[in-house]
Amino acid sequence: MGWLDQIDNYCERVDATFWSEPLNAVTNAAFLISAIVVWAMLGGKSDRGARILCGILAIIGTGSFLFHTFATGWASLADVLPILIFILTYLFFATPRFFDLPQWTGIAAVAGFFPFAIVTGWALTRIVGSLNGSVAYLPVALLIALYALMMRSRDPETSRGLAIGAGLLIISLTFRSIDEAVCPILPIGTHFLWHILNGVLLGWMILVLHRHLIR
């Protein structure tokens, strides 16, 4: 795929024009709104990790907007790269914070994510298929659930927050997965719901990280 090649992966897109995916484009505002709201909720508290994640969250919305308007190879990279950076940044800050470990464990968690995602992604693909490209995100949901389980006795409140995050991700992935399947009966598709729920999810995950620090 070339940088300027057109990509048509979603039910709502019917041609190569800029506004061919209006709902998929405008619902990226959910990421920007979430970033602004969470930033405001941090108030004057010092939390470098949460502030950085808010900034990345806003970039996710911008990158996804570019992809659902330009729909090219370069726009696809602008869409997926900020999401990966958010995941890795969250792991970097959350691992030592949640488990009261040295900061280097955050680096280890980031390095360990790649083999974890590759192995679990391969295994899950063999079980459930590609899920319209959504299977790549299932290792993230599994990892959040594992962290929730490990935090159950250490900090039940943080554990519940992470479990809610894992549940939200599964629900949003469901809407991402069925987008093409429902196209014959719902021409707008369901991908826009992935954006809205993910905006809520990522903002929630930042708050879980922050509230663990201030307790």
Image (cartoon, grey):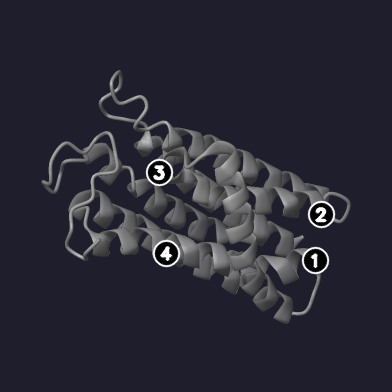
Residue 99: image tag: 1
Element type at mark 1: helix
Residue 82: image tag: 4
Across and down, in percent, residue 154 comes to 86, 56
Mark 1 vs 4, N-terminal side: 4
Mark 4 vs 3, N-terminal side: 4
* Residue at 27% across, 29% down: 188
Mark 4 vs 2, N-terminal side: 4
Disc 1 marks a residue whose amino acid type is Phe
Camera sees residue 163:
yes
* As drawn, 46 above or below 142: below
Mark 1 vs 3, N-terminal side: 1
Residue 20: image tag: none
**Structural distance between the alpha carbons of marks 1 and 3:** 30 Å
Quadrant assignment, res 48? bottom right
Mark 2 in CB contact with mark 1 (< 8 angstroms): yes
Along the line of sight, the residue nearer the viewer: 185 or 58: 185
* Residue at 43% across, 45% down: 133
- Crowdedness of circle 2 by 10 Å Cα count: few (<14), some, many (20+)? some
- In the image, is 125 to the left or to the right of 30? right
Disc 3 marks a residue whose amino acid type is His
**Label 3 belongs to which residue?**
195
Mark 4 in CB contact with mark 2 (< 8 angstroms): no
